[in-house]
Amino acid sequence: MNNTDALREENTLKLLFTYSLPMIIGLFVGASYNIIDRAFIGHGVGDIGIAGIAISFPVMMMGIMAFANLIGTGATALTSIRLGENNNNEAERVMGNALTLLILVSVGFIVLFWIFLDPILAAFGANEEILPHAVDYTRIILLASIFMIVGSGMNNFIRADGNPKKSMFTLLIGSILNVILAPIFIFGFDWGMKGAGLATGISQLISFIWVMSHFFTGKSVLKIGLKNMRLSGHLVGRIFALGGGSFITQMATSVMMIVMNNVMLNHGGSTAIAGMNVVNAVQTFIMLPIWGISLGIQPIIGYNFGAGNYKRVKSILVSAMVLSTVIAVVASLFIYFIPGSLVAIFNQNEELIQFGSHAMVIFLFFTPLLGLQIVGAGFFQALGKAKQSIFLSLIRQVLILIPLMLILPPFLGLKGVLISGPISDFCSAAISVTFVVFSLKQMQKEMIQEQDPGSRTKSADFHESNT
């Protein structure tokens, strides 16, 4: 039994842990690396170095990861479905198109930002003091961005190929190597911001080599071929449509943070901004394992959906929603009972602790429901249902949270920002569950129709219309 056969035959609960746990570990390691890397820069370069990273991060890393996920997750969803249909040739064609897109996006990204880097960084808040440090770091990251975008995007196919642990090692290799190289370059060679950028660039190059080598081994089901890299308009459209949810989520997070910071500044000042940033950091930490579950189940669901194993699709989805909800409930106990202690991890200022703990309890009140929306959006992406995936990715932040943060504060002040969180979480979870239940009922009708070919219902086109 090869790795993809396990997707069809292995116990679904075991598959859930096999695919989700490596993603969760990788995400946590990546998040920890970001914190450690900033600590090195803070000690080696100073506050001005941290400010330079803060300016560069939204411009470079969010853009890099957003485009990598746009192409990588969209193409992987389609690839998993084709593998489930035993259509390996078409699966490799999808992957080949994705590789071409990743390369083209990388080159375009490098050229555009290289030419307009200074004004872009200035537009994101770099003053004359910060700009040189931000430029030193960002130019090196730019040169390495092709390895980041292609490596990160193609790493999704390692999971689709039935190798979740190897996909996890991609994240571990880059993070651990960066942590080793950064202090050597920053402190040992006294290269400052350039050293930090070089450490990241080298780490991503090694990760890229690790990822690409997978597809040239005899153990890989998916192979890279030049003939498959010729772009197909139909496939490109499907890839962008299916990856749109992941792309929108990352872009929406950036927009939400900008809106929230401005609203908090107008109604509460710097303490309010700091407090809500702590709240968002805690929420992000809680969401990491849920994101890991959502990403982990996608190759399993996509493969079994393509194979017509709808009972397994339902089983893995229900297990994922239950597990993500349990994680969120446990995390909520800390939010409800010791919010002050969580805020104190970030800062000991009494005023900040008081506001942050109050804000955390209110804004994150419906944290137990987070998994329903996140896993729900991932479920539809895995099915190849682009419209539903994009809509569910939009509702929480773009359609509900951001409008509420703009509408409520003029009437309710800071309280308006705080209550916008639970309102958006509850509404988005309710809508997601409604979509999921309807989709599962459609699958049930499809199963009945397949058992009785003489009966024809609308659900008979359920599979074909979404792949």
Image: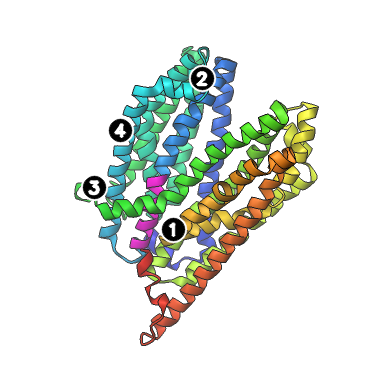
Crowd band around label 4 with a 10 angstrom C-alpha radius: few (<14), some (14–19), many (20+): some
Tell me, yes or no, whether the highlighted magenta stretch contains residue 376: no
Q: Does any portion of residue 447 appear in the rendered image?
A: yes
Amino acid type for the residue under numbered disc 4: Val
Measured in 3D between alpha carbons, the distance from the residue under mark 2 to the one under mark 3, in whole angstroms, is 39 Å
Question: What residue is rendered at 68% in x and 38% in y?
Answer: 279
Residue 342 on image: x %, y %: 73, 37
Residue farthest to the left, as pictured: 227
Q: Secondary structure at mark 3?
A: helix
Residue 456 on image: x %, y %: 38, 83
Colouring scheme applied when the structure was drawn = rainbow
Q: Which part of the image, by quadrant, shows the N terminus?
A: bottom left
Left or right of 81? Residue 412 is right
**Residue 126: image tag:** 2
Q: Which residue is mark 4?
A: 107
Disc 2 versus disc 3: nearer the observer: 2
Disc 3 versus disc 4: nearer the observer: 4
Disc 4 versus disc 1: nearer the observer: 1
Measured in 3D between alpha carbons, the distance from the residue under mark 4 to the one under mark 2, in whole angstroms, is 25 Å
Amino acid type for the residue under numbered disc 3: Met
Q: Secondary structure at mark 1?
A: helix
Q: Secondary structure at mark 4?
A: helix
| Nearer to the camera, 147 or 219 | 147
Amino acid type for the residue under numbered disc 1: Lys
Mark closer to the chain start, 1 or 2: 2
Mark closer to the chain start, 4 or 1: 4
Left or right of 311? Residue 222 is left
Mark closer to the chain start, 4 or 2: 4
Question: What residue is rendered at 67% in x and 35% in y?
Answer: 278
**Residue 387: image tag:** 1
Q: Which residues are magenta?
A: 70-82
